Structure formats: C-alpha cells, structure tokens
Amino acid sequence: MKLRTGIGISQAQDAAEAGHAAASAALAELSGEPPALIMFFCTPRYDLPKLLAAIRAETGDTLLIGATSSGELVRGTCMGFGAGVAVLALTAGAYRFAAASASHIRVDMDRAAQDITRACRDEAGASPHAGVLVLADALLGDLQQIVQGVYRITGPKVPMFGGAASDEQQFVETCIFHDDKIIRQGALALWIASERPLHVEVQHGWQPIGVPLLITRAEGAEILEIGGRPASVVYEEQLGLAPGALSEEKFWDTSIKHPFGLLQADGTFVIRVARAKMTQGGLRIQGCAPSAGSAVQVMRGTPDMLLDIVESTATSALEGHPEASVLLAFSCAARATIFGERKAEEAHRLQAAAGPVPVFGMHCCGEFSRTSGVLGTHNATLTAMAL
C-alpha cells in the first residue's frame, strides 16, 4: 500500500489556534485514511504545552514526534523565524513506525541513545530494511555520542538521519516532542521498518582554503590547540587576520562563513562550525568537536556554492524510489543565515527538484546523517531521505 501524506501549516500567533489549524489541515489531506505518524516542527516562541495539546486534540493517540526549529521547510516555502507550525501526517503505507525518547541525558548520551534505539527497534519488529530518524537537543554538547549510541544498536547497515532541535539561534533552550511529552535535554529515535532499502543523502557545498591543520588538543565540544598552538590564533591566521582580531562578541559573524572541514579518508569533508571563541583561546564547536589527531581545513562558502547542492541532494535522495510520497529534509540554520534574503530559495529549489513529491523539514542546529562509518554529526549541511 502506498504511503499517503498530509501537510498543514499555520502562522497564527495563538498556540492553540495554530495547533488546531495545522493538524486538522494535515489530516484532511489523508481523505479519511488513519494516520500512523504525526511529525511537526514549530517556532519556540509558542506556548509549547498549549500547542502540543491542540495538535493532540486533532490527532488523538497517533504516534507523534517533533521539535522546535529555526524555520520550517514546507512544499517550497521557508516559514522562517517567528510564529509558525508545520504538521505532517503519514499513513503507514509499506512502513512501520516506532519511537522512543529520553530526557536529561547529558551525563551519558551514548547509553541513552542505545536505550531508545533498542526500544523503538524492538517495538517496530523485524523487517528486511530499516532507517532511524533522530531528533536531539542541540545544546547537549557532543552530539556524536548520540550517533555512537544509535550505531551500537543499528550496526552499519541501517542508515540514520535527522536534526538537532533549534531555537531560532538563541542557544537558550530547544525542545523535542514525543506523544504528550515535551522532552528537554534529551533525544528521540524513530525506527522506520521498511520493505525496501532506505537511502540518506548528505551534501554541503563548502570548499577548503589554506592548508591542512592537525588538532593537537580537544576536550568535550572545544578545540583547544591546533599544531600545539591556541586554536583561535591558528584559525585567525588561516583567514589572514592578526591574532586577537576576532573578538568573542563578533566571532560568530565570521565563523559562520568559515567553518572547519574535518578531512575524511575518501578526501571529503564533514563540516564543523565554531560557535564561540573562548577566553583562553579555544573554539567551541556546535554539536561535536573533532578529536585530537584529526586533520581539518578552514572552509569557505558563498550563498551560490551552498545553494548549488540543493537539487542534487533532493534528486539523489529520491533516486530509485519512484513511489516516494514525501522528502524529509534537514538543513542547518547557519545555511539560512548565510543565504540572508535568499533563504527562501533553498526551500523553493528543494521542492522544484522533488517535483510532485512534497518536501517537509526544518532548519535545525546540527544535522544527523550516517551512511558509512561511525561519524554522523554535521554542521551547515543539508540531508534528506525519501519515504
């Protein structure tokens, strides 16, 4: 049976009004077929308990997952900052969905990720193929620990994708939703049991500048030294700046346009954005700092470069899936910031490339995408999967 989708949006200022409107519109597009999964993304400015209650009032006890975001990507529209909620309703089709979540997991994210992945896998049951969608609090720290925990349960054959909840780049509090619960400082895993292989596509468009650099000291989510010297000094030199030229207050304005590229064995790069310059010369990385011994290069990217990978990301995710009913997409809020007045172009180009298949996703604060190896955390990147 073919998967059916329904999508509803609302930009009403009132949380209850927005939740009811978006959820009822999504359900209406299913033409009476019962939903098997509800997914929603929303601005963090809403009264979240009221919003969740309103959506649940429309969708009943159907499995529900969601997250706060930095803007929703829906059918060619970027809803942007401010009031907004987007709801996706899915029938089961050829899939089985099961979710598990945990809150306040900072002390052992690896173990928590194992627990929720095992729980949703066991609930979904055996299938020839599967995938895992992961949502997590962006402010937990080293999000690679969550990827590692998921991987310990899935092994190499099950792809994972998703995004870290965002709060319109305020970096104060991000939330995840699971059924009737608002999950704080936690993570959620959605197991997708499938009769066909699931494919995750991830691209970014950044290009390296300068020379390869060796990280010699890193702790937690911070790069402390590069080549035995303070990380911020080396970073500034790579940009042709004098040591100390970038103040802590103005650092983000530059670092968002010049992330690190973590060099992979095949010559590709995984992107790591330095979110802040620390007083002692370290650089705090959003989501996951490269470990000591890693090779990195400073990168550059223009709006054109970062937008030029949108079509190929969408078409590659849809390739080999002629009956796809939805393209799920997670793009970094940093990309939207770089696009500026052109940020709507990403959503438009995604939908144009997807053709009749609706696009649904969000601007997040760190992306998850693992298809080979263990590394699966990204910054300033676009990832997508078709169902």
Image (cartoon, rainbow, N blue to C red):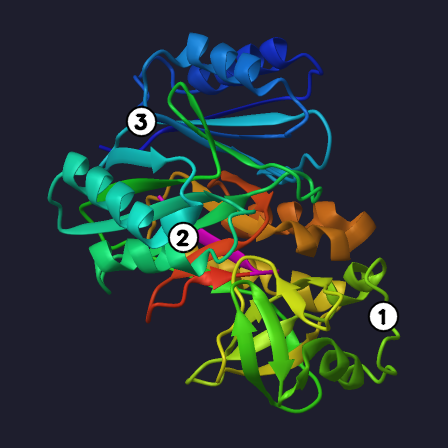
Q: Quadrant of residue 240?
A: bottom right
Cα separation, mark 1 vs mark 2, equals: 34 Å
Q: Which of 269 and 329 is in front in this view?
A: 269
Q: Is residue 56 visible?
A: yes
Residue ID for mark 3: 91
Cα separation, mark 3 vs mark 2, equals: 20 Å
Q: Position of residue 230 (x, y in %)?
A: 70, 81
Cα separation, mark 1 vs mark 3, equals: 51 Å
Marks 1 and 3 close (CB-CB < 8 Å)? no
How dense is the environment of label 3, judged by Cα within 10 Å: few (below 14), some, or many (20 and up)? Answer: many
Residue at 51% across, 64% down: 220
Which is more N-terminal, label 2 or label 3? Answer: 3
Which is more N-terminal, label 2 or label 1? Answer: 2
Q: Does the magenta stretch include residue 187?
A: no
Residue at 51% across, 73% down: 290
Q: How many labels does the image show?
A: 3
Mark 1 residue type: Leu
Residue at 18% across, 46% down: 195
Residue ID for mark 2: 161
Q: Position of residue 47 (x, y in %)?
A: 62, 17
Q: Which of 203 and 355 is in front in this view?
A: 203
**Label 2 residue SS:** strand
Q: Nearer the viewer, residue 342 or 211?
A: 211
**Label 1 residue SS:** loop
